[in-house]
Image (cartoon, rainbow, N blue to C red):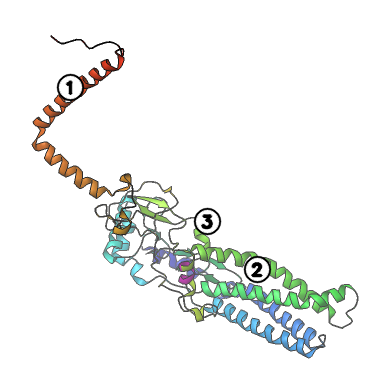
Amino acid sequence: MSTAAGMAPRFSAMSGPCKICFKAAKWLPVLFIVSVVVWSYYAYVIQLNLFTVESIIEKSFYLLLYHFLLVLFLWAYWQTIFTDIGRVPKQFRLPPAELDRYESAETDEARRAVLEGFTQKQNLPVYNRTMTGDIRYCEKCVQIKPDRCHHCSVCGECVLKLDHHCPWVNNCVAFTNYKFFILFLGYALLYCLFIAATTLQYFIKFWKNQLEVPAKFHILFVFFVSIMFAISLVSLFGYHIFLVVKNRSTLESFRAPIFQLRNTWVQDKDGFSLGAFNNFIEVFGDNRSLWFLPLASSLGDGVSYPVRGQPPPPSATTTTTTPVQSYGSTQTSLGDGVTYPQRCVDEDTDDLLGSRQRWAEDEENELTAGYINNHAHETNSSCSSLAGRRVELATNRVVAEKGTRAPSEEPQSVV
């Protein structure tokens, strides 16, 4: 029996009323957020602006900016909730024949060979591996996991570039809606900060017993609620901005992805990082007019991703199953080891270089020519050098004797 068939009774057991209740319970966090937003609209628009604020200019400014932020906030929230999660393409799923071979294999090496052969046959762009260097395979979905893909236990399927499953949106935050989730956090933070800033003066009046309106408690509560939500959102929003700049997901920040490096497998937390700006472009797209709008503009297909120091495909080299080590980066050296860039010297500035700053190629040519000439007259040069050395020593000896002789001493005649 295949794995898919074995999993069928487990899902069919939760059917009927139990399944409906489980699905309804997952919407409770979303209903809570919607209820808070509806109440904040009543407290801010009706009780504060319509019944409390007296200045028409101040009231108009508050209402216009409030509704502008509210529309962006709800738009991003809607897109995060109802955008379909990225599902793995069918070519990553094992066919029945390959699945039977995989399940009937008795050893880990045999199962590894089945997955390696299927990956090479389908030419799948898979660079990530497990801790033991094996291809990442999902037993529940009976398919090979693309890079940055993980299985969500709540949704019951593998999701492309899974960041985490968020109960506040009742959806997986993944490749298809990660931009919407970032905008949702940003606009929710601005929404809370705007409410807190514009209700601060009325909270001070309430503290001084100068606010005599029937709805003063609504104004007080909306101020405190906006402050509390802003405090929680600022840390969450800042953390995900950090992840965007580093091109990591929440799962990858806790467990670094594993790449191939020199016939082994190493963990590299920055393996997908292409630089801060390029990482931002990968999530928000290259169209600047769509950066801050909840519209789909992310780059890529969610299956393959540019890798810093792109490792060779798994089919090109023979890999080992050495336990994973952490070297920090998979970036490799540039060049082929044969040709190298050469530095050109300007003729006008060449004379400014000292004798020790001449380039190696000129010195090499001179040494080569000298070696050829010296090799042709090796014997004569050796004898001439030896004779010249003896003459030099004799001359130095005569000069030394003359220097030590007294001035009045006459030279002796040589017989």
Please give the residue where the numbered disc 3 appears in the rendered image.
254
Residues drawn in magenta: 278-282
Distance in Å between CA atoms under marks 3 and 2: 21 Å
Q: Give above or below for 158 relative to 314.
A: below
Crowd class of label 3 (few under 14; some 14 to 19; many from 20; radius 10 Å): few
Please give the residue where the numbered disc 1 appears in the rendered image.
390
Q: Residue at x 39, y 68 (%)?
A: 303
Residue 304 percent location from the top left of the image: 38, 67
Front-most of 45 and 78?
45
Crowd class of label 1 (few under 14; some 14 to 19; many from 20; radius 10 Å): few
Give the quarter of the figure containing the C terminus.
top left
- Residue 256 visible within the image: yes
| Amino acid type, residue under disc 3 in the picture | Phe
Q: Give above or below for 124 relative to 324.
A: below
Tell me whether circle 2 and circle 1 mark residues in contact (CB < 8 Å): no
Residue 142 percent location from the top left of the image: 38, 64
Instruction: Give the quadrant of residue 367.
Output: top left
